[in-house]
Every structure is written in C-alpha cells, then in structure tokens.
Image: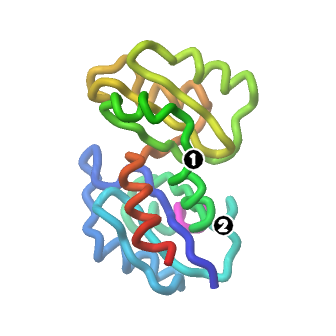
C-alpha cells in the first residue's frame, strides 16, 4: 500500500461546503485505507494499492460527483511527489520573502512548450510563474484578489483544470504525513 494525497478542487469554496468527516467517509467508501483530511480545503491523504494515475483520479471524481451532486476536480500525487513540490525552489529566497503568497498549482499533466509560454506571458512586476512537470508555481507580491491573474484565467490558458495550494500548506502536509 502506498500513501497518496488527493488535492480536490471546489471543496469549501463557492458555496460547496463539505464537512471533513463526510469527505473521509466518501474516500473510505472507495475502499481506501488510513483516510485523513488536512485542513478544510480539500486535501485528502489515503492509502491504496492502485497507481496514482488518471483512472484513480477519474474514479474519485465520479464517486464525489455522484455523492455531492457537482464536479470535483481531483489531482492525486504520491507523498514522494508532494515532498518534491515542497522543497522545490522556483523563485529566489529574496523574492519569496518579499511575496505576499507563493502557491503550487496541481494540474492534470505536463504543459506543452507553447502553453508554458502563455503562462509565462502572465508575468508582471506583481506576479511571477514557473512550471515544472504537472505543477505550476505562482509568486504573488500582493493579495491574489488584487492581481489581474486568477485561477479561471490560468485554466483558460492551460486548457484544463488546476487547483492551487499555498506552499505553506504543502510544506505542513509533508511535515505531518511523510514520516
């Protein structure tokens, strides 16, 4: 059995309120073991023998949509992948220290060079971006409500869904669950 994290999109935002005990029950209903949630923003830690691939993500998404009545984008990563995200430094320490927030965006797959180019076109003196594999990194020097870039604009550029997590959350998640 391997330990994974499912980063869920549309949980406890936009009127879609789900209690964490309900979310744990939904994942347990899929025969996953050692199911836990981490903060109330749709981070579910679980163990399974299944591979962390598209089929697993689709299985979770179908189950959640049937149970909750709306689509929940699901992005599964192994603990090793999350650990790599938590230590990756796409921006200088100086830039991170001056930033208002640094976030990791979890995507379905790797982006083509032309789509990465579109993402890089979002860079300004307020926002900086970096893409590596299935993750995008966003350094914002102001509150994300004050920037011209938002999740919807980013999703249109990449042609698919993304779910964002504050890097502090990613680091805390790894600290707690990667023992």
Front residue (pair 74, 124): 124
Q: Where is residue 76 in the image (x, y as percent from the top left)?
A: 57, 61
Q: In this view, does 155 lie above or below 61?
A: above
| CA gap, disc 1 and disc 2 | 21 Å
Q: Position of residue 49 (x, y in %)?
A: 66, 82
Left or right side of 113 for 40: left
> What segment carries the magenta color?
57-62
Which residue corresponds to the image point at 50% horizontal and 86% vertical from the top-left? 33
Front residue (pair 110, 31): 110
Q: Is residue 145 visible?
A: yes
Front residue (pair 133, 163): 133
Instruction: Tell me which corner region of the image, top left, top right, bottom left or bottom right, holds residue 14.
Output: top left
In the picture, the quarter occupied by the N terminus is bottom right
Which residue corresponds to the image point at 75% horizontal and 31% vertical from the top-left? 112
Q: Is residue 155 above or below residue 171?
A: above
Which residue corresponds to the image point at 64% horizontal and 45% vertical from the top-left? 134
Predominant secondary structure, magenta span: helix
Instruction: Tell me which corner region of the image, top left, top right, bottom left or bottom right, holds residue 55.
Output: bottom right
What is the total number of numbered labels drawn onto the structure image? 2
Q: What kind of element bears circle 1?
A: loop
Q: In this view, does 19 lie above or below 74?
A: below
**Magenta span includes 59:** yes
Q: In this view, does 63 lie above or below 127?
A: below
Q: Where is residue 84 in the image (x, y as percent from the top left)?
A: 60, 56
Q: Is residue 58 visible?
A: no
Instruction: Tell me which corner region of the image, top left, top right, bottom left or bottom right, holds residue 3.
Output: bottom right
Q: Name the mark on residue 88.
A: 1
Q: Residues within 10 Å of mark 1 (few under 14, many from 20)?
A: few
Which residue has dot 2 on it?
52
């Amino acid at each position: 059995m391997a330990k994974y994290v499912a980063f869920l999109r549309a949980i406890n935002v936009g009127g879609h309120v789900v209690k964490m005990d309900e979310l744990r029950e939904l994942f347990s209903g899929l025969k996953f073991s050692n199911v836990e949630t981490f903060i109330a923003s749709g981070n579910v830690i679980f163990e399974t023998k299944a591979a962390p691939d598209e089929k697993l993500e689709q299985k979770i998404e179908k189950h959640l949509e049937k149970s909750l009545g709306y689509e929940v984008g699901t992005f599964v990563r192994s603990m090793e992948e999350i650990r790599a995200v938590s230590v990756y430094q796409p921006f200088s320490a100086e830039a991170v220290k001056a930033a208002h927030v640094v976030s990791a965006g979890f995507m379905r797959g790797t982006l083509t060079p032309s789509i990465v180019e579109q993402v890089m076109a979002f860079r300004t003196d307020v926002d900086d971006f970096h893409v590596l594999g299935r993750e995008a990194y966003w350094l914002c020097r102001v509150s994300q409500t004050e920037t011209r870039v938002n999740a919807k604009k980013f999703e249109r550029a990449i042609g698919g869904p993304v779910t964002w997590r504050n890097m502090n959350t990613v680091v805390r998640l790894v600290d707690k669950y990667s023992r």
